[in-house]
Image (cartoon, rainbow, N blue to C red):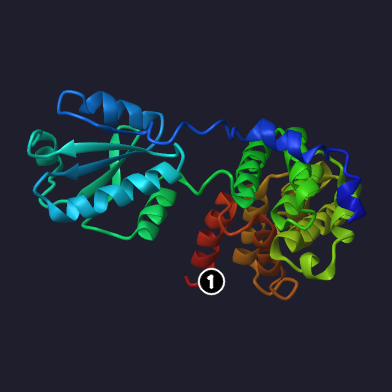
Amino acid sequence: MSGVNNNPYGGSFGSQMSASVDLGGAPAAGGHIKDTTTAAFSKDVLEESRRQPVLVDFWAPWCGPCKQLTPVLEKVVDEARGRVKLVKLNIDDHPSIPGQLGIQSIPAVIAFVNGRPVDGFMGTVPDSQIRQFIDRIAGPAADDPAVEIAAVLDEADGLAAAGDFEAASQLYGAVLQADGENVRALAGLAESLIAGGEHGQARELVSSLPEDIAKDAAIQAVVKKLDQIEEARKLGDPVAIEHELALNPEHHEARMKLAKILNVEGKRDEAADHLLFIMRRDRAFDDDGARRQLLQFFDVWGVKDPATIAARRKLSSILFS
């Protein structure tokens, strides 16, 4: 994996991770469980849920299932070590809040996030289901290395999307210091190298991977992108090609070249439109080559890319009109 270990953006995995994910100290057990009232509900639940998820346990002294659920709920919330807070409301003493929320049976647990109820459950449930519920609301425990790595990768993806490819590469490299075969980090680092103009380093990186990793769809997309870039470099001056098309719009071979150049320049919508133009005029050109080329673009862009979605819609209108 020399291409990973020698990448110019690699750094200490520990320092990168600590800079990106605040694991913090866990609060003392029990410090995140309290009772509330109608008057304090807004502060204890609505305001607090803007800082972290809050679970509200609606209960009553006469409710047998409540007496079974509450200790289990408190135990699991304690184990969550501050990822959520638990607020308990006696509905006999404070009936207006459960009435407004439409609580018709208890025990009922409602999760609030950003001042709004987002999920909940009723009745007694085992501790395993409560843990799953908390994970769904607050995300898995941050002390899970896989969760921490995923958080760093999310941050790196965000930096790349914002155009800060050097910072993104540093985070991808940090992940690879800990997990040298993390496909998402490998693909992200290669994409960032490409965006930074380091095509040779990106090619070296993907060429050094074991066969099983090299076959991954994300890595294959990077390889195809590099191939498209290398091909586009040989196709000529786009300004000259555009002039040629102005004189002869039916010059499909020139239009195909321009589409390939525009693609590697990041002008995906324009590239797709040129290929769709060829398809509308002559499906037989290059044995339906415009459609085949467009599908190759889709492989690299990804199914969720806005350019892919828009071009697929236009493609369908051509194929099924």
Q: Is residue 58 above or below residue 210?
A: above
The residue tagged 1 is 319
Quarter assignment of residue 183: bottom right
Instruction: Kindly identify the amino acid type of the residue bearing the numbered disc 1.
Output: Leu
Residue located 65% across and 47% down the image? 149
On the image, the x and y values in percent for residue 302 come to 62, 57
On the image, the x and y values in percent for residue 36 come to 21, 30
Q: Nearer the viewer, residue 135 or 250?
A: 135
Question: Does residue 87 appear left or right of residue 26 in this picture?
Answer: left
Question: Number of labelled discs?
Answer: 1
Q: Nearer the viewer, residue 216 or 294?
A: 216
Question: Does residue 57 appear left or right of residue 272 in this picture?
Answer: left
- Which quadrant: the N terminus? bottom right
Is there any visible trace of residue 252 in the rendered image? Answer: no
On the image, the x and y values in percent for residue 44 come to 28, 27
Quarter assignment of residue 82: top left
Q: Nearer the viewer, residue 51 or 169?
A: 51
Residue located 21% across and 28% down the image? 41
Question: Does residue 72 appear left or right of residue 222 in this picture?
Answer: left
Residue located 71% across and 33% down the image? 164
Q: Which element carries disc 1, helix, strand or loop?
A: helix
Q: Is residue 182 above or below residue 84?
A: below
On the image, the x and y values in percent for residue 241 come to 80, 48
